[in-house]
Image (cartoon, grey):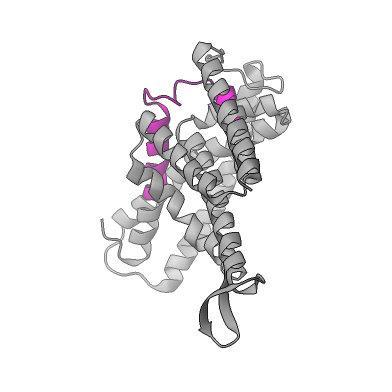
Amino acid sequence: MKAEGFWEKTVHHVTEALERALVAEGLASRPGLLQGLDPRAKVLTFLLLMVSVALLHSLPLLVAFAFLPLVLSLLSRISPAFFLKRVGLFIPLFTGLIALPALFTTPGRPMFSLWEGLAITEQGLRAASTLVLRSWDSLSLAVLLVLTTRWDHLLRSLRVLMVPRAFVLVLQMTHRYIYIFLRSINAMFLARKSRTVGPRPAGENRRFLASSMATLLARSHHMSQEVYLAMLSRGFRGDVMTIEDFALRRRDALWAGLAGFLAAAAIIADRLLT
């Protein structure tokens, strides 16, 4: 759909956000390798792998670690193109810009001279490459964890890291509220567009936007009170109880052992190579 104009762009972007949320839920429900693991085991092992990546200095090992999330995504029935699109969007925009000055400011042996007084040094290229590869590996693991774990399960599993119960509850409610209000915003703009014939003055569009924001704020306040009263009436005492319960199985232990072996082997090999 080609978005043209204020209303079309707004409805288009809100609908895209809803679609991304639905796609993420669908990926986490597929019968893949990582989807079948206990969320607590995944959180601990992925955290262990990310810590090991942060401790590596060897470029070959960092490059090798970049292929691990790709292999795991294939085993988890996630398209590599979809996965790389989610990861590769942020690395050039953020980490690449941060690492760019290191190419020229790090003292060392010049490799490429752009003009007099400005050259890319060997040490600068190595430092920038290390930063980019570490960011790529860590972000790949984090994105893979989110894609293969339902959001409510991921938040519940944070309790194994001693995250306060109130903080986890706030995150759970925030995620659900964002999804509900995205649907409300989408419905409001579609209703407005269906009742509009021809272009409208810019002032009227701004007034509608302001009134929509006020309506959404009032609705969110009213809904929060209703939800809290409903939770109290159903026995809420500070922790969210769900029908599904986590249970560690043999495959979780095997995965934890494999992840621990990879992390330890990478750190030992890094010390030998450097």
Does residue 226 appear in this view? no
- Residue shown at 64%/26% (left/top)? 229
Between 147 and 211, the residue placed more toward the observer is: 147
Magenta stretch: includes residue 99: no
Comparing 236 with 89, the one in front is 89
- The image shows residue 267 at horizontal and vertical percentages of 63, 38
Left or right position of 89 against 52: left
Q: Nearer the viewer, residue 144 or 211?
A: 144
**Residue 152 x, y percent position in the rendering:** 54, 28
Q: Magenta segment: does it hold 22?
A: yes
Residue 100: image quadrant is bottom right
Looking at the image, residue 180 lies above or below residue 110: above
- The residue drawn where x is 52% and y is 39% is 141
Which residues fall within the magenta stretch? 15-43
Where's residue 156, x and y in %?
Answer: 61, 26
- Res 28 visible: yes
Outermost residue, front direction? 272
Residue lying furthest bottom: 116
User: Is 97 above or below relative to 22?
Assistant: below
Q: Main secondary structure of the magenta part?
A: helix
